[in-house]
Image (cartoon, grey):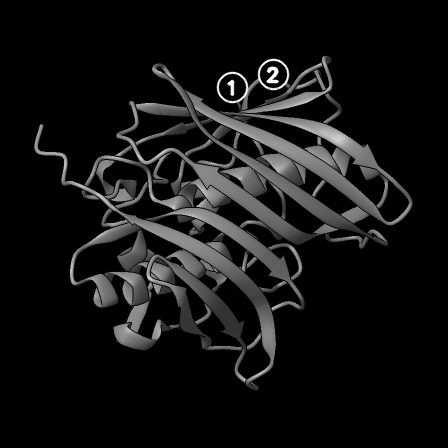
Amino acid sequence: MTQIQHESYPPEQHLLRDLRVEFEQRDDGRGYGWLPVSEFIRNPSGSVHAGVLATLVDMLGGGLAATAVAPDWIATADLTLHLLPRPAGDEVEGVARLLRAGRTTAVIEVELRDELGALGLASMSFARLIRRDDNPVVPRPGSAGRSTLALPNSRLTEPLLDQIGFAVIDASAGEIELPLSSYIRNTLDAVQGGVVATAIVVATDAIVGTNAGVPVETVDLQITYLSLVKDGPLRTTARLVEPNTADVSVVDAAGQTATTATAVAVLVEPNNL
């Protein structure tokens, strides 16, 4: 298995390393990824946190889209994720396929599954950008076998939301705050798209759970990325449109709306097995 190294991204301490995802682009035109499931990324029900799965989708979709538009580069434009609220096995596999690659956008679909079957389905679109010298080089499909960003010491050492650094300011309003650090930035020096999605999940779980009076977990996301969050802290606000559905906005330090989303959360039973 190959460790992917780049002189500027990601740094040694980074979320994408600590998740220990292995991935591969094969000659069949698809991208494959394998996420080991630890206690630090599970919900109380035993399912995998939707923000982590959104990050996996973003990694796989981004890698395949970057290959499709090469030598240009990409930025996430939108992401839709639908999940089955059930306990996951010890590993989640993602399979990404290219739906379309045009002059301005690339569209990717990602299936998520474990040893028991389907876990979810996602789709993403990416804006096509002019390549910069510091963008990573994506290996040619089928040329590298399995690769990983993980280093020998890369791993989560506490629950994901704590390690990223989220703080809930007002759960009833879906207000959370996240200071920016190199740990969560992407190749454009902004908050990585999966981390933005994770912020939306945290806000949704907070506002829906507070309204319901019981713990919930997000199972559906529809996210539109409007601009990059380069200056922090990142903040969210939310409002309920249905008892289990929230509209969430992500704003940057200047108060500019960077991302909008609609998310659905469901009541779940703790997994006591």
In the image, 214: left or right of 40? left
208 to 218, vertically: above or below? below
Number of residues whose C-alpha sits closer than 10 Å to that of mark 2, classed few (under 14), some (14–19) or many (20 or more): some
Is residue 36 placed above or below 239 in the rendered structure?
above
- Residue type at mark 1? Met
At x 16%, y 57%, the residue is 214
Residue assigned mark 2: 145
Query: How far apart, in angstroms, are the residues tagged by discs 2 and 1?
Result: 7 Å
Precedes in sequence: disc 2 or disc 1: 1
Disc marking residue 1: 1
Whether residue 206 sits left or right of residue 63 in the image: it is left
- Which residue appears at 24% of the width and 67% of the height? 211
Does the residue at mark 2 contact the one at mark 1 (Cβ under 8 Å)? Answer: yes
89 in relation to 128, above or below: above
Q: Is residue 170 visible?
A: no
Q: Position of residue 30 (x, y in %)?
A: 67, 21
